[in-house]
Image: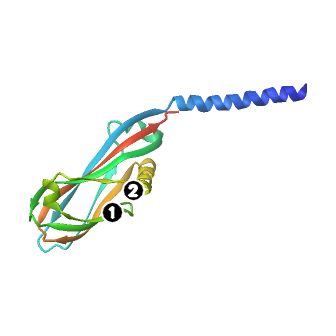
Amino acid sequence: MKNTIKLVFAVLIVFTFNSCDEVNELADVNFNTTVSEDIVIRIGENQEYISDVITLNLDNADTHDYLDMLKNITIKKLTYKFKDFEGNENCTINVEISTDNNVFEARSFTIKQEVDNETVFEITEVSKINAMAIALQNNGSVTFKMEGEVFAGIADFKVEVTAELEVVANPL
């Protein structure tokens, strides 16, 4: 009889804790949002190197109320594009694109050509995107950097960085 009572009590405890987990999951708030920032780059005469940084911040109208309740962030899509070009049409850069010392790619670009073609570059390396998502979740922001060599300079342009996010928050 004592063993039966202990067994029933144990089953009730397990059921109670499983129910709490299920209730907690029901409180999850799932939504999509987009964060975007521009890196403003100005290349002067005889300038041979650029190193420009922006902070991609998670705090926006969609996420503001949930910043202290984040459970998971997934980056569904990470892109960048060049825009608002003025200057030498032959301006070429050879740069590394990175976040928090996590290099995504190293490429050469003829800026005016990319602006004219309205080229959107997508970063697809899953392990690096996941590392960026973890940094966003833990810190609320991530540093996005573009640095490298300049050829045939004198130009002003912007690099628009956009991350499409799936966010799970839980107020409990």
Q: CA distance from mark 2 to mark 1?
A: 9 Å
In the image, residue 91 sits, relative to residue 4, either above or below, namely below
Disc 2 crowd, CA 10 A, few/some/many (<14, 14-19, 20+): few
Helix, strand or loop at disc 2? loop
Q: Is residue 143 left or right of residue 89?
A: right
Amino acid under disc 1? Glu
**Tally of marks:** 2
116 and 147: which one is in front? Answer: 116
Q: Is residue 8 left or right of residue 166?
A: right
The image position of residue 33, as x and y in percent, is 34, 39
What residue appears at the point 73 percent right and 30 percent down from the top-left corner?
13
Hey, which residue is sitting farthest right in the picture? 1
> Quadrant location of the N terminus?
top right
Q: How is the image coloured?
A: rainbow
Amino acid under disc 2? Glu
The image position of residue 57, as x and y in percent, is 34, 48
Q: Is residue 76 left or right of residue 150?
A: right
In the image, residue 87 sits, relative to residue 68, either above or below, namely below
Residue 125 is tagged as: 2
126 and 57: which one is in front? Answer: 126
Q: Earlier in the sequence, mark 2 or mark 1?
A: 1
Helix, strand or loop at disc 1? strand
The image position of residue 37, as x and y in percent, is 26, 50
Which of the 4 image quadrants contains residue 58?
Answer: top left
What residue appears at the point 40 percent right and 40 percent down from the top-left corner?
166
Disc 1 crowd, CA 10 A, few/some/many (<14, 14-19, 20+): few
Which of the 4 image quadrants contains residue 52?
Answer: bottom left
Which of the 4 image quadrants contains residue 85?
Answer: bottom left
Mark 1 lies on residue:
105
What residue appears at the point 41 percent right and 57 percent down from the top-left corner?
128
Marks 2,1: beta carbons within 8 A = yes
